[in-house]
Image (tube, rainbow, N blue to C red):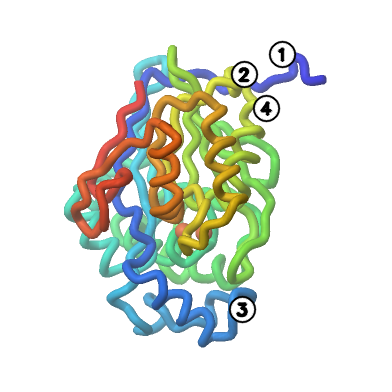
Amino acid sequence: MTTVQSLLDIGVLNRLRILCISETGWFDTKEVFDDIRDAGGAEIDQYAIPWPPFGDLHKDNAAGFAALLEAETADGAQHRVLFDTGWNPAWMDKRFAEEGIDQLLKDGQIEALVISHEHFDHFWGIGSTLRHCPHITLYIPEGFHPKGLTFIKEQGHTGRLITIPPDQPLLLFPGLAIVNFPMHTLLRVDGENVLYARIRDRGMAMMTGCGHGGVLNLLDYARRTFQGGDRIHALYGGLHIAPLEDWDESRDRMVESLGQYGIAKLACNHCTGRRAVEKMLETGLPVLRGSARNGSQNELFVGNGDVVELA
Ligand SMILES: [Fe+2]
Ligand SMILES: [Fe+2]
């Protein structure tokens, strides 16, 4: 049995603010999955599909996932971290400009870019970040493909590139840890970085790009790894419960299990799935609603330009 002494103390944040820059990976799910099918199916190499920025295939359907985290550590210092960098450079340039991310990058006000995983909708827009700040420190999960690593260089990255090995929490600064969950998923993508923060007097916040490792596994990891990990205050990001809206009983059980963690704020979006969020609301879970603007398509969940304050 795990003892309290063996749990990792990551420190605490005074506050954490999350700006959803873009949660819309794409606008039309059927079109994306038709493109994947036409290119050879779920197990093909994603770099074989001529989507932006490598080609023009259905370029207006491409958007991407990115969020800005603003944290205050216990000593009062302010930290800004970009969590993912979207997909379509044209879309990301637009969203970065609308939210002032471009200027923050130019001014050196964002200290790191953490890539959750190599999927096109989280990573292929890296040029939009590097154009403004080529020397930004970059964190990726172990498991990136040679084409992804080459792409980072080709896009002009000159800063430190830090690869997170699986199952070894890395403290970005006191109060915020990155963990790489080993997994293999659609389009030969391996490994996903998940962020865990501990917020004073509140509990843990978990931030996921897609949560391909399974949201319940990721929450259980926090419980058995971190001091305070048994008290989950908030979730942010994609929970990958039913991204294709293919509902079945296992999803019902997943949402019911999620209800047992006592989470106070559920800011899920991206690949969580509309039906999954409706089920959460039916179950009485505290889902934060959005304003359905800047390309986000409904008010069920936190969308593009919406802010989540955790303090
Ligand atoms: Fe995604
Ligand atoms: Fe993904």
Secondary structure under tag 4 reads helix
Write down the residue under mark 3.
44
Between 76 and 200, the one lying in front of the other is 200
> Would residue 129 appear left or right of 120 to someone viewing this image?
left
Q: Position of residue 141 (x, y in %)?
A: 60, 52
Q: Report the residue at 61% width, 39% height from top.
A: 216
Q: Earlier in the sequence, mark 3 or mark 1?
A: 1
Q: Report the residue at 45% width, 49% height from top.
A: 276
User: Badges 4 and 3: C-beta atoms under 8 Å apart?
Assistant: no
Mark yes or no: residue 138 visible: no
CA gap, disc 3 to disc 2?
40 Å
Give the amino acid at mark 1: Val
Write down the residue under mark 2.
227
Which quadrant would residue 148 be assigned to in this image?
bottom right
- The answer to whether the residue bearing label 2 lies less than 8 angstroms from the nearest atom of ligand 2 is no
Secondary structure under tag 2 reads loop
Write down the residue under mark 4.
225
